[in-house]
């Protein structure tokens, strides 16, 4: 039973997925706070003593939410619910499209994706330009030496779509 339980989501897309299981997110960051772990923490009170939280994440997630909650006095169970693995090679369809020059951009949705894409696209980085979902991802791309050509204004699919449109409009002008 989840009666009396507060459910938080890092953004509206995650909140929407919860509804498919009959759950409703009580806390979701606003676009101005960014749809991210930091954005979620910004929606919370500075002090959460005595509260118990379960943080679900991947085996490769950063511990931003868990640490932020602990710093606010909450008791945290960090539940690593699924494993994230990086691909070790491109699919034949993607490799073929790259060779034919049909791929010009890579949408990069996390620092982990930035690192994996940097490695997998090594032979094509000069032709494939990254578009980043957030400032943190753009920073990681810069550190890798593969700077983002565009960055989403908000950490969401809508934000990425708008960033791709800006990039395309620059090419056409």
Image (tube, rainbow, N blue to C red):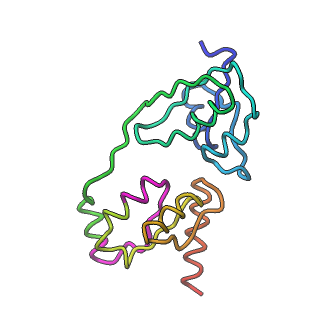
What residue lies at 63% left-to-right and 48% top-to-bottom? Answer: 35
Tell me which corner region of the image, top left, top right, bottom left or bottom right, holds residue 69: top right
Tell me which corner region of the image, top left, top right, bottom left or bottom right, holds residue 104: bottom left
Residue situated in front as seen by the camera: 132 or 143: 143
What residue lies at 57% left-to-right and 25% top-to-bottom? Answer: 76
What residue lies at 56% left-to-right and 75% top-to-bottom? Answer: 167
Q: Measured along the vertical axis of the image, is residue 90 above or below residue 1? A: below
Q: Position of residue 21 (x, y in %)?
A: 54, 27
Tell me which corner region of the image, top left, top right, bottom left or bottom right, holds residue 139: bottom right
Q: Position of residue 171 (x, y in %)?
A: 54, 83
Q: Measured along the vertical axis of the image, is residue 118 above or below residue 30? A: below
Q: Is residue 159 left or right of residue 100?
A: right
Residue situated in front as seen by the camera: 100 or 29: 29
What residue lies at 49% left-to-right and 43% top-to-bottom? Answer: 62
Q: Residue furthest bottom?
A: 173
- Image: magenta residue range: 98-116
| Quadrant (top left, top right, bottom left, bottom right) of the C terminus | bottom right
| Quadrant (top left, top right, bottom left, bottom right) of the N terminus | top right
Q: Position of residue 94 (x, y in %)?
A: 30, 64
């Amino acid at each position: 039973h989840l009666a009396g339980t507060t459910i938080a989501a890092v953004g509206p897309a995650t909140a929407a997925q919860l509804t498919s299981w009959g759950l409703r997110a009580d806390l979701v960051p606003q676009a101005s706070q960014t749809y991210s772990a930091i954005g979620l923490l910004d929606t919370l009170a500075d002090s959460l003593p005595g509260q118990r939280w379960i943080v679900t994440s991947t085996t490769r997630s950063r511990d931003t939410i868990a640490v932020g909650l602990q710093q606010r006095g909450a008791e945290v169970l960090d539940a690593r619910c699924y494993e994230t693995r990086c691909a070790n090679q491109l699919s034949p369809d993607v490799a073929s499209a790259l060779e034919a020059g049909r791929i010009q951009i890579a949408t990069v949705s996390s620092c982990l994706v930035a690192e994996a894409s940097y490695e997998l696209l090594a032979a094509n980085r000069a032709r494939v330009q990254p578009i980043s979902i957030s400032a943190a991802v753009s920073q990681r791309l810069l550190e890798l030496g593969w700077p983002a050509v565009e960055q989403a204004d908000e950490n969401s699919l809508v934000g990425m779509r708008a960033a791709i449109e800006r990039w395309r409009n620059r090419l056409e002008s």
